[in-house]
Amino acid sequence: MKKILVLVLASLAIVMLSACGSKKSSSKKVATTQVKQEIVFNLGAEPKTLDPQLNTGIPGAIVIDNTYEGLTRQDKSGKFMPAGALSWKISKDNLVYTFYLRKASKWSDGKNVTASDYKYAWLRGVDPKVASDYSYQFFYIKNAKAYFDKKAKKADVGIKVLDKYTLQVTLQKPTAYFLGLTASAPYMPVRADMVAKNPDTWSQNPKENISNGPFVINEYKMNSTIGLIPNPYYWNKKNIKIKNLNFKMLTDSSTALVAYDNNKISVLVDLPVQDIIKRKIEDPTFHVLPMLGVYYYDFNTKVKPLDKLDVRKALSLSINREQIVKNITRASQIPASGFVPFGINNSVGKDFRKSIGDYGVSKTAKVKEAQALLAKAGYPNGKGFPQLIISYNTSLGHKAIAEAIQAMWKKNLGINVKLQNQEWAVFLSKRIHGDFQIARDGWVADYSDPMTFLDLFTSYSTYNYTDWKPYNGKHPDSKIFNTLISEAKNLKASPKRDEDMSKAEKVLHDSYVTMPIYYYTQPALVKANIHNWTCNNFGVWYFGNSYIGAKK
């Protein structure tokens, strides 16, 4: 998912974290009250949850980022600014962070937001009983992992309330990007009394989803609309110009595009692939926004013959990534040359991806090598190879990519695969529970550091759907990977840390448990009269500074 950085890396990563937003103009100021201040944004899939500690998808993150507020918030330039916290102090050893909360910050029912609210939310995020998919994002805090593993008590976790408006956090080890984590959804506060009422459904109930951000939910219609209005108690409410922020859930991109052209939708981020080139040329409201993310396929290594390295490698080598981005996605995406995308600096200010190269990943298919590997695995020319299924969530774009890969594997390897599209919630559930053979996947950074991509495949990560874990003598390379990641997490920004992460990515690459395809961009349509919108390169849109009308 989406946000981070600090101290030594700050000056470097701010450049890489630059967000996208509408441009300023010298036009005369026009009163925004003369036009209807309403934005309609198509989320596509319905969020599985709007619970900050449990959400895992970008659709949910977008709603959460507009209704909640963490201790910090990223501005247009990528710099992390005071939000729920007015200021903070960091100890010389970079282990203790003391946050001084904004006393004017209130919940949408008028109650004060306190340090205890943050402590409750963070402990909830790492509570083993809650089992958040993002629990590992709290492991940077002292004893948080031990608490999650039931080897320490809740009271041992390094989160202290010094007074009503002062929160102190002690880290396990210095973490260069911790400050940015405090802007991400898992670190946002939630109200204990609201969660206690209905732990599973409170976030979808407008009466119970009490939030502390610029907007508040006033309507929720399943598979249809999430309606937001300004939070009357928001500390910066005078700056909120949008009166209605409505999120639609049209999963068919062609239908959504028609709605955009008919002014029923004002922001659209999932465009039909066949329309992207035309819009790019002809439509001035079309934008290609940067995004720190990678589109990839997971191989379920429990499934035969995907348990064989040679098979997985043959499948990866036989696809033409350049053809996919040129003929299908067509929005300036870059063929993946490793798992970590371009756009993240290492400790010496160089792009991590550029500095370590591509591990021999080819933009075009290496057909002969792939065929030899498949024959070595016992399937010459694809003979005897069982039919596999590529699963993806319903989307014309995902379908087009899957069809292209299906055709490449048939032509280059002589194997047949079926395609299976699934509704988003079903797809997520099956992928989480390992009920798939080959599954579409994608990851957008939560913060600007290679670790946000690499630790997905640790043995303790809830996002490691591949079953690439060191157990019963299987996957010894996974054990090496885990060790390298652990070492990197315990190091300050340094060439040694860069080296450990580079080695870890090489181990991941050589395992071929995942098949990176391309690095994301975000094609989007935004009506010309919407101004001061921002979309950070983690894919999260924010409208707290937006207005509709003539440019100011």
Image (cartoon, rainbow, N blue to C red):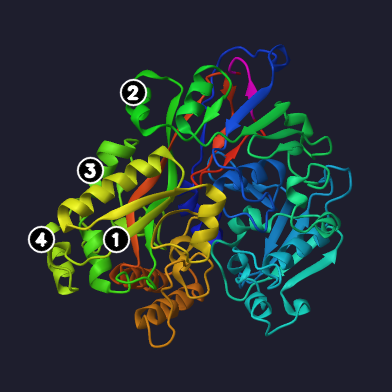
Q: Residue at x 17, y 57 (%)?
A: 414
Q: Is residue 342 at all visible to an observer of this figure?
A: no
Mark 3 → mark 2, Cα distance in angstroms: 19 Å
Q: Is residue 143 left or right of residue 464?
A: right
Mark 1 → mark 2, Cα distance in angstroms: 37 Å
Mark 4 sits on what residue?
368
Amino acid under label 4?
Lys
Q: Is residue 282 left or right of residue 364?
A: right
Mark 3 sits on what residue?
323
In the rendered structure, which disc, 2 or 4, sits on the residue that comes first in sequence? 2
Residue 422 image offset from top left, x and y in percent: 48, 49
Under circle 1, the secondary element is: loop
For the residue pair 427 and 280, the one nearer the viewer reads as 427
For the residue pair 508 and 467, the one nearer the viewer reads as 467
**268 shown above or below 171:** above
In the rendered structure, which disc, 3 or 2, sits on the residue that comes first in sequence? 2
Q: Residues within 10 Å of mark 1 (few under 14, many from 20)?
A: few
Amino acid under label 3?
Gln
Mark 4 → mark 3, Cα distance in angstroms: 18 Å
Pair 3/1: label in front = 1
- Is 462 contained in the magenta span? no
Q: Residues within 10 Å of mark 2 (few under 14, many from 20)?
A: few
Mark 1 sits on what residue?
387
Which residues are the magenta region? 546-551
Q: Furthest-left residue in view?
A: 368
Residue 17 image offset from top left, x and y in percent: 49, 47
Under circle 2, the secondary element is: helix
In the rendered structure, which disc, 4 or 3, sits on the residue that comes first in sequence? 3
Mark 2 → mark 4, Cα distance in angstroms: 36 Å
Mark 2 sits on what residue?
278
Q: Is residue 156 left or right of residue 397?
A: right
Amino acid under label 2?
Lys
